[in-house]
Image (cartoon, rainbow, N blue to C red):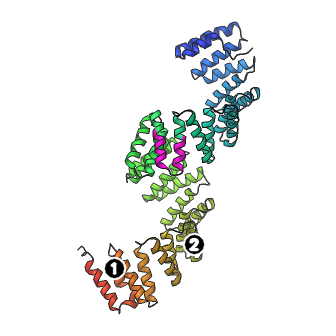
Amino acid sequence: MPVTSTFSLSSYLLSKKTMNSLQQAIIDFTAVIKQDAANAAALVGRGDAHAELGHYEQAIADYSAALQLTSEDSLFYRRGTLYRKMKSFEPALADFDRAVQLEPNNAKNWVGRGNIHYERQEFERAIADYTTALELDPSYPAALYNRGKCYAEIEADAAALADFEAVLRLNPEDGAAYLGRGRLYAKKGDYRQAIADYTQAITLDPTDSLALVGRGSSYAELGDYTLALADFEAALQLDSQEAQAFMGRGLVRMQLADLPGAMADYDQAIRLQPQNVEAWLARGTLHFQQGQAERALADFAEAIRLEPQDARGAFGRALVYSQQGDHGRAVVNFSQALRHNPEFGAARVGRAKSYQRLGDFERALADYTQALALNPLEATIVYNRGLLYHNLDQPEAALADYAEAARLNPQDRSAFYNMACLLAGQNRVDEALTYLHQALVLDETGEILAGAQIDSDLDPLRAEPRFQALLAEFSTESPPANG
């Protein structure tokens, strides 16, 4: 018997959807079922009442009994939806498969099955189902929004943006679409536009803690830590179990030098989401900065266990070993990070430094050179390579790198000073004095001046009156030493 138009008593009682009316509906449907066990409409009605009350297992039992009497796509859809709520995705998928088979022209059935694929992280399959739904009903907001979420998951950001904007054209007050679009803007670094979208989502739903977290993160990226902190705290007032709010607040507290507060937030984030790799990495970094090597290593090890392909866990562990002077282990972990992400410039520089400490200068030079190929405008890398050339007694290569480092960073006093030292050794007096003068001009601490007075590399200049005059000039300009 068809059950699309459910038992009239069900329609009346379920329309009210109060607890009393729903409980009464169950009583009344049960009475009907006792008189007629084959009354599919009554079984469906009682199942609907149980579903509204959150009694999913009882509702599924009633729908299953009704399906023994009739096969309608709507019943498979109902039961599949409840299986999804219970996280029972295998039977849910089977039900939506059956619903699609029975009524392939019903867009709702395709969306239902797409939702299960989404839950199972089968994003390509989900996109295919949502697309079929949209072919049947081009103005189906849920299909557009959910497809947009899937596109975002597979980093098809342009397609995701198009879907979220299509939702907003259909309904300019769809807060979820603003949230989704805001995340895309934030991902590409357009934080001000992201903030605008998050704000719109919050205006439409002031209880949207995820929008507050998103906006707080964007404020933090712009360096507005006061507004960021306010958003994270507002999110936690709405939902004290929101792990991402603790993460965001922890990162802000780090920037504000509230290290105990940051540690407490990371602890909470890990407690709430022990699978959150970002939280383990953040806490490991904080332990490292506080000199708590063993705790840092433990956190980075857990991050690696959770996500072995994430280069950051191995990188963090390498930094700890490097700080401990264990450069052999540091090289192993920097190398692991680079296997996972060959373009991880900081890992390549870290490995170069460890190779250098181990005396493997050829590999150190190779890593510095590859790091510069990734980021040719990074003055620090150029300087470090120049320093290695300098120590290897390759003055021309060292001079070239120091000069480039000074060009990229005209405030780099060490680059100018080292050029002066090398040129002095080549008896290029005028050039050496020019660069030494520039280094002394930039020397705010007196360190360069102190070094110049005793550095043997500058001995070839000491008989030169201009050298002595230069030291005298900056000695009189230097503040008197405390004592």
The residue that disc 1 covers is 449
Q: Secondary structure at mark 2?
A: helix
**Residue 122 vs residue 193: left or right?**
right
In the picture, residue 152 is in which quadrant? top right
The region drawn magenta spans 180-199
| Residue in the image at 47% along x and 59% along y | 293
Name the residue furthest front: 169
Q: Up-down: is 215 above or below 284?
A: above
Magenta span: chief secondary structure: helix
* Farthest-out residue, bottom: 463
**Magenta segment includes 323:** no
Q: Amino acid at mark 2?
A: Thr
Q: State the image coordinates of residue 144 (x, y, percent, origin top left).
A: 62, 36
- The quadrant of the picture occupied by the C terminus is bottom left
Q: Is residue 456 at all visible to an observer of this figure?
A: no
Q: Read off the residue under disc 2.
A: 369
- Check disc 1 and report its element: helix, strand or loop: helix
Q: Which residue is located at x 42 percent, y 50 percent?
A: 252
Task: Please state the horizontal and vertical placement of residue 262, each as a whole percent of the image.
Answer: 42, 49
> Which quadrant: the N terminus?
top right
**Residue 7 in view of the camera:** yes
The crowding category of the residue bearing disc 2, from other C-alpha atoms within 10 Å (few below 14, some 14 to 19, many at least 20), is some
Q: Is residue 321 above or below residue 210?
A: below
